[in-house]
Amino acid sequence: MLTVAVLISGGGSNLRALLEAASDPAYPARVIVVGADREADGLAHAEEFGIPSFVVPWPGADRRDAWGEELNVQLRAWRPDLVVLSGLMRLVPPAVVAEWSPRLINTHPAYLPEFPGAHAVRDALAAGAALTGASVIVVDDGVDSGPILAQERVGILPGDDESRLHERIKPVERRLLIDVVRRIATGELELAAAS
Ligand code: GAR
């Protein structure tokens, strides 16, 4: 059974989907802990599913490395096989990448390498793109630049605004995330360090 830690900042809809998938005895992974950089709304999903959680409050960019060390301390205590960044809206510091990557993956609401960064949905709309998408990647030291594990296109429709488009991307992200975690757990997908 693959053990998974999930890190979030927001509502945690992708986290919830993974918790629901993992409540099926046939699913080969279990979420063992949820962490956040603030008192995120999504922590309520962990509570509902009886999963422990922790918060390492974001201390500001000038203390980012210390934040990363504390995140490592928390994660080490749980010894997860895999760490999933699922809407964690922070760049994880090099010490976190060094310790967990390639067993550190991220969901992203765009078809990488298109539209990396914190405003992927807004950026796709601003660029006038006809298509965007969703991706699951291995986290490396860059901004959404690690090896792509899965991705799928999502069309941009007339009248889409950021929230409407994001709500159409998220179900695709959820499906990709659940499938990637399953394939990692079964050994179908091997995580190799970024070259
Ligand atoms: C998801 O779309 C995730 O990919 C995105 O935040 C959303 C979180 O939603 N992450 C990023 O944009 C990271 N660059 P959720 O909290 O409802 O799962």
Image (cartoon, grey):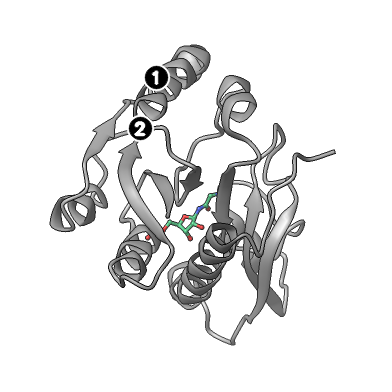
Residue 143, given in percent of the width and then of the height, sits at 68, 40
Residue 194, given in percent of the width and then of the height, sits at 78, 40
- Image position of 116 with respect to 194: above or below: below
Report the Cα–Cα distance between label 2 and label 1.
9 Å
**Dot 1 crowding, Cα within 10 Å, few <14, some 14–19, many 20+:** few
Q: Earlier in the sequence, mark 2 or mark 1?
A: 1
The kind of residue tagged 1 is Val
Instruction: State yes or no: discs 2 and 1 in contact (Cβ < 8 Å).
Output: no
Q: Secondary structure at mark 2?
A: helix
Dividing the picture into quadrants, the one containing residue 123 is bottom right
- Image position of 12 with respect to 67: above or below: below
Closer-to-camera residue (22/35): 22
What residue do we see at 67% from left, 46% from top?
144
Residue 140, given in percent of the width and then of the height, sits at 69, 37
Q: Secondary structure at mark 1?
A: helix
| Callout in the foreground (2, 1) | 2
Q: Is mark 2 within 8 Å of ligand 1?
A: no
Residue 106, given in percent of the width and then of the height, sits at 56, 50
What residue do we see at 50% from left, 36% from top?
90
- Image position of 95 with respect to 105: above or below: above
Look at mark 1 in the image and give the residue it sits on. 73
Look at mark 2 in the image and give the residue it sits on. 78
**Dot 2 crowding, Cα within 10 Å, few <14, some 14–19, many 20+:** few
Q: Quadrant of the C terminus?
A: top right
Would residue 72 be found to the left or right of residue 57 on screen? right
The kind of residue tagged 2 is Trp
Closer-to-camera residue (120/64): 64
